[in-house]
Image (cartoon, grey):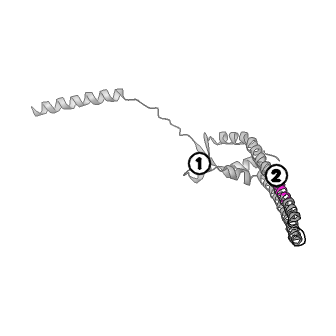
Amino acid sequence: MCFKYVYHILLSLAFIFNANSSLSQKYPIYKNLSSIAILDQEALFTDTIWGKNILNEIEVKVSLLAKENRSIESLLETEELLLTKKRKTISKLEFDVLAFEFDNKVKQIRNEQAIKQRKINDFLNDNKKMFFEKITPILLSFIDELGVEVLLNKDTVALASTGSDITKAAIAKINSQLKN
């Protein structure tokens, strides 16, 4: 009798499992996993010939601006010392007028120098933008060549194997294809 109950229980369970498995949703299993690579975009710019040339040009411009700023600063310090010495020999009203004019001159020079610095920054940003526009087709062709489906910036990746970083190979490819 016990065997009969066990038989019915097992038979019922078999029907339940069979019914559940036929109703369950099946997901496709992909045989090829997606190929993902990472790339250091900043290194693309700083380590390619194009980027190095731009950065050298920026360095020259910044150096010249810094030299100009030091020269202007020296002249303004001398002018301020002369103004301080005049303070003892002229009236307060005359001194206040001269001090006001000097302050305005300093503000104008600061604004002019800030504009020059912004132009250097704009030059860098414009060249970076142009660089990335020019390398996009090169990178697309390169990742197709490698069979890479997804390319991520290194800064957005938490962990990756060292073999997934294609930055150096991309730099070599860009240097060979991108002319100044």
- Residue 48 location in percent, x, y? 75, 52
Left or right side of 15 for 116 = right
- Residue 90 location in percent, x, y? 90, 69
Q: Which residue is mark 1?
A: 156
Task: State if disc 1 and disc 2 touch (CB < 8 Å).
Answer: no
- Residue 114 location in percent, x, y? 80, 54
Name the image quarter holding residue 149: top right
- Residue 161 location in percent, x, y? 56, 52
Q: Residue at x 61, y 48 (%)?
A: 38
State yes or no: residue 106 in magenta. Answer: yes
Q: Secondary structure at mark 1?
A: helix
Q: Residues within 10 Å of mark 1 (few under 14, many from 20)?
A: few
Image quadrant containing the N terminus: top left
In this rendering, the answer to whether 62 lies above or below 20 is: below
State yes or no: residue 152 in magenta. Answer: no
Please name the amino acid that badge 2 sits on: Ile
| Separation of marks 2 and 1 at Cα, in angstroms | 34 Å
The number of callouts visible is: 2
In this rendering, the answer to whether 16 lies above or below 92 is: above
Q: Nearer the viewer, residue 136 or 31?
A: 136
Instruction: Look at the magenta stretch and give its main secondary structure.
Output: helix
Q: Residues within 10 Å of mark 2 (few under 14, many from 20)?
A: few
Left or right side of 109 for 125 = left
Q: Residue at x 13, y 33 (%)?
A: 3
Q: Which residue is mark 2?
A: 115
Magenta part of the chain: 104-113
Please name the amino acid that badge 1 sits on: Thr
Q: Residue at x 74, y 41 (%)?
A: 133
